[in-house]
Image: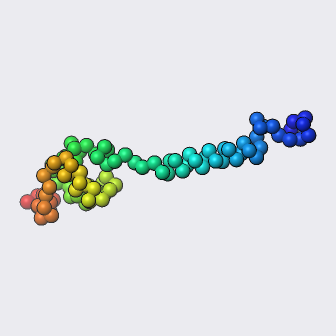
């Protein structure tokens, strides 16, 4: 305590310092939660998608599960990268090795 009647100074902490610290902590957490991840096309290269989809024959569902997205996003990436789109039956033939 200080010699000024038992009150703490700002540097020693107190209500306002604690309040500012709490607000800063909440703003930091809010900012972190509101940040969106980078778009998938910036995280998945054409080469990776080509290797997994075309050469290894993974389905759009398998790719979506592996990359943490959905089939429609994978389909859009295949279209964006101008990779040959397989029909449902052709994908199953690749899987079976036919």
Location of the N terminus (image quadrant): top right
Image x and y of residue 2, in percent: 87, 36
Q: Judge left or right: residue 26 versus residue 11.
A: left
Residue that protrudes farthest toward the bottom in the picture? 89
**Front residue of 21 and 88:** 21
Q: Is residue 93 above or below residue 54?
A: below
Please tell me which residue is depicted at 32% across the width and 56% down the height of the picture.
69
Location of the C terminus (image quadrant): bottom left
Image x and y of residue 11, in percent: 76, 35
Total number of numbered discs in the rendering? 0
Image x and y of residue 13, in percent: 76, 40
Does residue 77 appear anywhere in the picture?
yes
Please tell me which residue is depicted at 70% across the width and 47% down the height of the picture.
19
* Image coloring type: rainbow
Image x and y of residue 85, in percent: 14, 55
Please tell me which residue is depicted at 15% across the width and 64% down the height of the picture.
88
Picture quadrant of residue 97? bottom left
Picture quadrant of residue 57? bottom left
Q: Judge left or right: residue 3 versus residue 30.
A: right
**Front residue of 96 and 17:** 17
Please tell me which residue is depicted at 58% across the width and 47% down the height of the picture.
27
Does residue 62 appear anywhere in the picture?
no
Q: Judge left or right: residue 51 versus residue 23.
A: left
**Front residue of 62 and 11:** 11
Q: Judge left or right: residue 36 versus residue 12.
A: left
């Amino acid at each position: 305590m200080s010699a000024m009647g038992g009150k703490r100074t700002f540097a020693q902490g107190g209500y306002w310092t604690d309040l500012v610290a709490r607000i800063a902590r909440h703003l930091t957490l809010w900012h972190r939660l509101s940040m969106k991840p980078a778009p998938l096309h910036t995280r998945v290269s054409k080469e990776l998608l080509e290797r997994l989809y075309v050469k290894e024959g993974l389905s759009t569902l398998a790719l979506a599960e592996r990359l943490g997205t959905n089939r429609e996003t994978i389909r859009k990436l295949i279209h964006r990268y101008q990779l040959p789109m397989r029909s449902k039956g052709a994908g199953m033939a690749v899987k079976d090795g036919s």
